[in-house]
Image (cartoon, coloured by chain):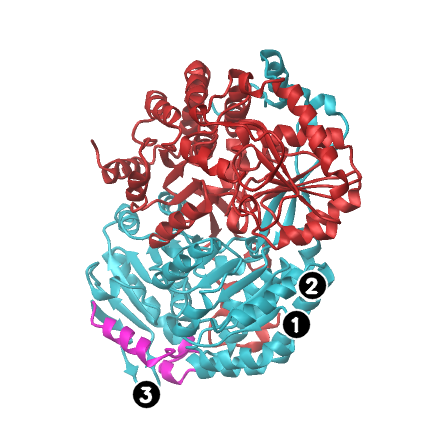
Amino acid sequence: NPYAGLVSHLRASWLSGKTRPMEYRMAQLEALGRFLDDKKQEILEATELDMGKPSFEAYFSEILLCKNELNVTLNNLCHWMKDEHVDKNLVMQLDSAFIRKDPYGVVLIIAPWNYPIHLFLVPLIGAIAAGNCVIIKPSEISKNTERLVAETLGCYLDSDCFAVVTGGVQETTRLLENKFDYIFFTGSPPVGRIVMTAAAKHLTPVTLELGGKNPCYVSDACDVTNVARRVAWGRFFNAGQTCIAPDYLLCTLEMQEKLMPALREAITEFFGHNPKESPDFGRIVSDKHFQRIRALLGSGRVAIGGQTDEAERYIAPTVLADVQPSDPIMQEEIFGPVLPIVVVANMDEAIDFINARPRPLALYAFSCDSKVVNQVLERTSSGGFCGNDTLMHVTLTSLPFGGIGNSGLGKYHGKFTFDTFTHQRGCLHRSMGLEALNAPRYPPYTQQKLGLLTAAFEVKRRGTCTLL
Amino acid sequence: MESMQQVVGRARAAFNSGRSRPLEFRIQQLKALERMVNEKEKEILAALKADLDKSGPNAYSHEILGVLRELVLAMENLPSWAAPQPVKKDLLTMRDEAYIRYEPLGVVLIIGAWNYPFILVMQPLVGAIVAGHAVVVKPSEVSENTARLVAELLPQYLDKDLYPVITGGVPETTELLTQRFDHILYTGNSAVGRIVMAAAAKHLTPVTLELGGKSPCYIDKDCDLAVACRRITWGKYMNCGQTCIAPDYILCDPSIQSKVVENIKATLQEFYGEDVKSSPDYERIVNKRHFKRVKSLLEGQKIALGGETDEASCFIAPTILTDVSPESKVMEEEIFGPVLPIVTVKSVEEAIEFINLREKPLALYVFSNNKQLIRRVISETSSGGMTANDVIMHSVVADLPFGGVGHSGMGAYHGRHSFETFSHRRACLIKDLRWEVVNKLRYPPGNMEVLHL
C-alpha cells in the first residue's frame, strides 16, 4: 500500500490534536489566502495552459469565488465551531444539552480538472475549518495546475496535516484502499459509484458532487435578448466545461426561431466575429474530450458555429437546432461549448421531458411570468435551481451546492462545507444530583412510574393543528 | 406473492403522483399512525413481550412513548420545518429571491433492528413521512412477532401504496437492496452496514447507517459512586444488555473496582429482587444464537457477579467481569448482552488513549464531579453521541442528532434531524429578466478592473 505511510503520518498528526484549536485553523486558512494572492499569476497561467481558460474567467472562478469562501469562513469560524445548545424538557432543566462540532479526522478531497483550483480549494477550506487533516488529490488531466499545486501548496500549509497526492486512475485506486474518515469527490457519476463503493469498505461517509444534463427551459413569454445573453454566458463559460452549465434548451419552435438571432448576437457581443481569436473563449482540455464533443456535432443541424480546430482543441460556440431526444448529444453530459435546442409544444411537455430523465445538478427556467418559473421549480427535482439566469445560484455562499440522485449526494459552500466535514455529536451533561427525578425510570416497572415518565417526557400538542 | 420490484415500483409511482407531498396529507398519515399506536397498544405490547420478554410498562416506556413523542413533534413542527428558508444575499443578488426549499427525495427504505423492534422502524418512518416520502419498511425478521404486527397494521391505517411493509430475512433483504431507493436508513451492525452502503453505491443512494460498537464508560475516582452505578446498572441491563447505546464496558481505577461491583450488585437487588430470573422486569436474550455468542464471552474471565445462564429460556444473569484483559474476546466485539467487563486504567489519560485506540463508538459515557475532566474527555475523544454522569439519556433529547461516526455509523436522525436527513435542500435563486445592466459586468469581453469592484 504505497500511501499507507502518508495516511498514518496524517493520522498521527490528527491524534496529536494539532488541528483542533481555532487559532491553528485560522492560521492555515490565512495561509491559503496568501497562496491565492501570491500564486495568482501562476494560477492564471497554469489554467490557460491546461484548457485555454481566459484570465477573466480564471480570476473570477479560481481566485475571487475562492476568496469569498475563505472570507466567509474566517469571519464566521468562531461562531460555527461553538457548541450549539438545544432545547431541553422539564426533567433536564439543570443539565446541559448541546451539539459538539467534532472533526472527522483524516479526509480525502478528490478534485476534477475543469475548475482545478476552486474544486479542491473550496472543500479544503471547509475541511480545515472543521479541524481535519486533509489529503488533496488534484486531477492529472489539468496537469499544469496539478504541478503547481503539488509544488507550492506545501509551502503554505502545515505538511504534517495537509498533503497533496498526484497521479492518475491507478494512483487514485490505491489511495482509496486506505481508510479515510470522510471522502469528498467531484467528478462523474460512474467514478462516483466507484468512490462510494470503496468508501463502503471502511464505512466512510462521502459527499459526491457529480453531474448530468442540466435542462434549460425558455418560455414563450420572455425578453429574448436577455435570455440569450444569460444562457450563452452560462453555456460558453470555460468552453462549456462546467458541471452546472445549461446543457440543453427546451422551448417551442416559435421561441427557437426567435432565440437564434439573439444567441448569434450574444455570441458576437461576447467573443467577436471569430471566437477563435477572442482571449475570452477557452479550449477543450484534452484530445479525448475534443473528439468526443466533435462527434456530437452531428446531432440536429448546426445553426450557429460548428467550426473546430483539432490542433488547438478549439470548438466554436455552437448552437444546434431541431435536436431529437434520441440524438447522441442528448445521451450524455456535453461538457463542451455546444447548445442543443430540443423543441417542445409547451411547458407541460418540457416538465415531463425533464422528469423522465435523471435528476440534474442544476435546472434553469426563463420566463417573464413568475408563475411559469414557479411551476417548473415546483414540478421538478434538481440539485439547485436558478430562475431567469444561469450559474449564479452557486456564487451565493449562503445557498447549499449539491446534487440529488445521479447528480450527487451531500452539499457544500459557505457553512455547508464546514458542516460537511463536521460530525455533529449529541452531548448531554447531566448533574449527579436530583437522583430522585430518575426514580420513575428504574425497575421494578409499575404503571404509576410509567405515568410519571409519560408526564415528564411527553410533548403536549399545542392545540389544534393550524393547517386544518 | 408480489415481487419486490412490483412493491417498490408501486411506491415510486405513488410518490410520483405527488400525493405524499402536501402538508395536509402528511399530517393526516401521521395522525393515523398516532391512532394506530394508541388503538393497538395491547397488540404492540403483546408482540414485544413475545419477542423480547418485555413487561408492559417497560415496553411502553421504551418503545411506545418515544414513538408518540416523535409523532407529536413532527405534527407540531412540520409547517415550520417544511417552509422555504430565505438566505442571506450578497451585492449581486440583492434584488433577487434566494431561498432553500426542503424537498422529499422519493422512496425511502427503512431497515429495522430486532432489539427495539417497534421504535426502530416507527421513529424513522415518522421522519420519512413528515419529509414527504414513500417508504418501504423492512422490520427485522429476528423479532418476528413485531415484524408480523407491523406488516398487518400499517396497511390498515396508512396509504397502502406509499408505505408497504416487506418481511423476510437475509435473502429478501438482499433482493430488496438491488432496487433503487432515494435514501436508505439502516439500523444494525457494521458488517451489514458495509453491505448496505455498497448496494446503495450502485444507485448513488445516500444512506444513514445506525450501527454500533463498544460504548465505553469511564468512572472517575471523584464521583458519587452509588448514583453513578445505579444509572449505569439501568442502562447496561435494560433489555438484557441488548441496547446499541448501552455502556458496553467500564474503565476505572483499580482502587474503585470492587466498590463499583458492590454498588452495581446492590442496585441489581433493588431493581430485580433476590431472584433475577423470576423478576417480570428482566428480559431474555433474543435467541439461541445470540445466547451462545454472549455466553462464550465469559470463558476464561473472572466473574465477580452473576454468570448464571439457562439455555432453555435464553437467560443470562446480570454479570460483571473484573480485571478484564484488553485483548480478550469480550473486549473485541460489541457485547450486546448483560455482561459488563471492567478494564482498569490508572488515569483519565490512559482511559482516553484506550478509547482512541479503538473504533469510534456510538455512545461514550463519563462519570465525574470534575467538570474539567468531563470537558477533557469530550474534547479528546470522538463518538456518535455522549452523556456525562448518566447513560442513554442523550438519545431522548429531542433536538440532539442521534447517530454514529466511523464504524458506529454515518448520518443522524430523531426530531428535526430526521426531517433534514430525509430532505433534499434545494438551492433556489430567482432573478428578474430585467436589470441586465448589472449582468453586463460579468460578460465577455472581460475587463479585469471590473472584477476588483
Dot 1 alpha-carbon crowd within 10 angstroms: few under 14, some 14 to 19, many 20 or more: some
Which disc is residue A311 wearing? 3
Specify the quadrant of the image occupied by residue B201: bottom left
The chain that appears cyan in the image is A
Q: What amino acid is labelled 2 in the image?
A: Lys
Single out the mark in the foreground, 3 or 2: 2
Q: Residue A250 location, x and y as percent?
A: 29, 56
Name which residue lies at 61% across and 31% down.
B235
Amino acid at dot 1: Asp
Please determine whether, in this image, residue B50 is positioned above or below residue A92: above
Quadrant for the N terminus of chain B, please.
Answer: top left
Q: Residue A140 vs residue B99: left or right?
A: left
Q: Both on one chain, marks 3 and 2? A: yes
* SS class, disc 1: loop
Q: Name the residue: 53% across, 77% down.
A: B447
Q: Name the chain under label 1.
A: A
**Picture coordinates of residue B402 (x, y %)?**
56, 39
**A119 or B378: which is nearer to us?**
B378
Please tell me the numbered disc located at residue A18: 2
The answer to the question of whether label 2 and label 1 lie on touching residues, with beta carbons closer than 8 A, is yes
Q: Say yes or no: labels 3 and 1 on the same chain.
A: yes
Q: Which residues are magenta?
A: A270-299
Crowding near the residue tagged with mark 2, few <14, some 14–19, many ≥20 C-alpha atoms within 10 Å: some
